[in-house]
Image: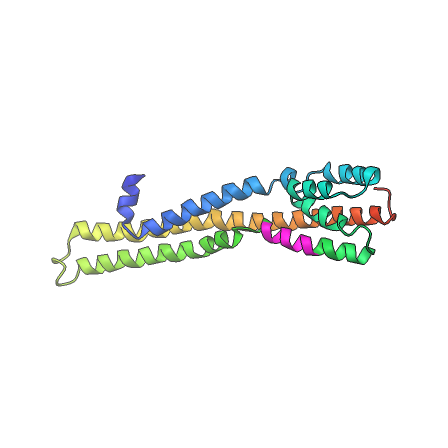
Amino acid sequence: MFALIQAAGWPVWPIILASIVAVGIIGERLWALRPSIVTPRDLLPRVIQEYRKSGVSAEMLARLHQHSPLGQILAAGLRNDKSTREIMKESIEEAGRAVAHDLERYLTTLGTIASLSPLMGLFGTLVGMIEIFGSNSPTGGGGNPAQLAHGISVALYNAAFGILVAIPSMIFYRHFRAKVDSLVVEMELQALKLVETVHGERKI
């Protein structure tokens, strides 16, 4: 592997750095966007059961807010359980926007890496081409085969590394965006069930 990096030359280092950042973001988002963490299935029934038993308390709201993203949304709604249905929904929507923004954390960076990696590879290709032409110039020693081979290596390896980083980054970027949208819809549906239950429009 180190031999490949040496063959690719110095332009490959920004691509390697971008790949390390991308792997870190992908791993963190795979862990953070698990449905069991974001939208625990047993949370809403437990919240409604506790609400019917003892109402809303500061301790309950604090516990919910710390529990999960869905808990933050349900806590925002329960803070306004004595208000009208519209006010309760507005508070849930406001909390939902903040939670959705938090779920999209680092995705802009991942998308940027997916877009820039091919350009960084292209930059390395241009550097390699410059070395190739330099080796064939009158001042380049009349065509140095070693320099020519090195220039070709820089050109090809950087293009390959750039594409290699861009493809999985774009795949995971689109996957995470779709997953965030799906989780947001799921939280909206559960929050709507809470509103309708609090206002007596459904049992659960």
The residue positioned 28% from the left and 51% from the top of the image is 10
Decide: is 77 above or below 30.
Answer: below
Give the color scheme: rainbow, by chain, secondary structure or one colour.
rainbow
> In front here: 88 or 6?
88
Q: Quadrant of the N terminus?
A: top left
Q: Position of residue 166 (x, y in %)?
A: 44, 51
Is residue 97 among the parts visible in the rendering? yes
Q: Position of residue 82 (x, y in %)?
A: 82, 52
Q: Which residues are magenta?
A: 94-102
> In front here: 69 or 111?
69
Is residue 164 among the parts visible in the rendering? no
Q: Position of residue 113 (x, y in %)?
A: 45, 53
Q: Is residue 55 left or right of residue 162?
A: right
Can residue 127 be found in the magenta stretch? no
Q: Is residue 160 left or right of residue 43?
A: left
The prevailing secondary structure element of the residues shown in magenta is: helix
The residue positioned 50% from the left and 41% from the top of the image is 27
> In front here: 59 or 8?
59
Q: Is residue 54 left or right of residue 151?
A: right
